[in-house]
Image (cartoon, grey):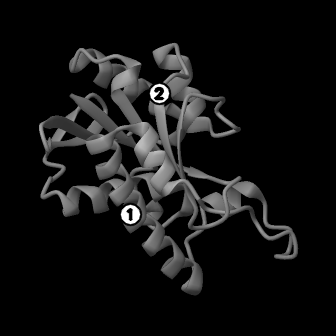
Amino acid sequence: MKLIIGLGNPGKEYSGNRHNVGFQCLSRFAKDNHISFDKKCCLSRTGSGRINDEEIVLAKPQTYMNLSGKAASQLLRRYNLKAADIIVVQDDLDLPAGKIRLRLGGSAGGHNGISSIITDIGTKEFIRLKIGIGKPDSRNNGTEVVDHVLGNFGGEEREIMDKAITRASEALTCLLTFGLDTASNRFNS
């Protein structure tokens, strides 16, 4: 069994935010695989299904980003899983908008949701699917990072991100089917 956690903030006011790209990707993946988020469990909205022979649980923590680890640790206990069984889908400021990268382990890189998960599950050794949202444009009236990540994608950027989310959904399927090395070689950009 694999647990795929998409990071984001709950509530309609956050649904289009850059910081919610993890939720957006998980919604796309769920739609592509006919999975619905029809349960509430472990501080999360969850859905389950199968990819090939692999049972999967999808989870969108409802704790707000900075407390995502509370949901992740409860989910691991509930399903009797190890960190090696989880995949976390996250936004990444350090990747240009629309780029994706699969990676095992590493630091939180300043991402508070990832930091919370590392703290609460006690390890950084889990797979992350990072979706680039780019850094704020320093010429854009000094937009701060918080304003950037909590801002919505605009026009051309939304088109780029829609394609990235589709590609990230495909990367999840490849990862579950062929493993990290094959998926990384195919999708890391």
Q: Which residue is mark 2?
A: 126
Determine if residue 126 is in view: yes
Mark 1 or 2, closer to the camera: 2
Q: Which residue is mark 1?
A: 12
Q: Secondary structure at mark 1?
A: helix
x, y percent for residue 174: 32, 50
Residue at 49% x, 46% y: name it.
184
Q: How far from the left and from the top, in percent, is residue 75?
A: 29, 25
Asked which secondary structure carries label 2, the reply is loop
User: Along the horizontal axis of the image, is 34 left or right of 100?
Assistant: left
Mark 2 belongs to which amino acid? Phe
What amino acid type is highlighted by mark number 1?
Answer: Lys
Query: Quarter of the image holding residue 99?
Result: bottom right
Compared to residue 188, the image places residue 179 above or below, namely above
Asked if one can make out residue 63 in the rendered structure from this viewpoint, the answer is: no
Q: Nearer the viewer, residue 6 or 45?
A: 6
Q: Quadrant of the C terminus?
A: bottom right
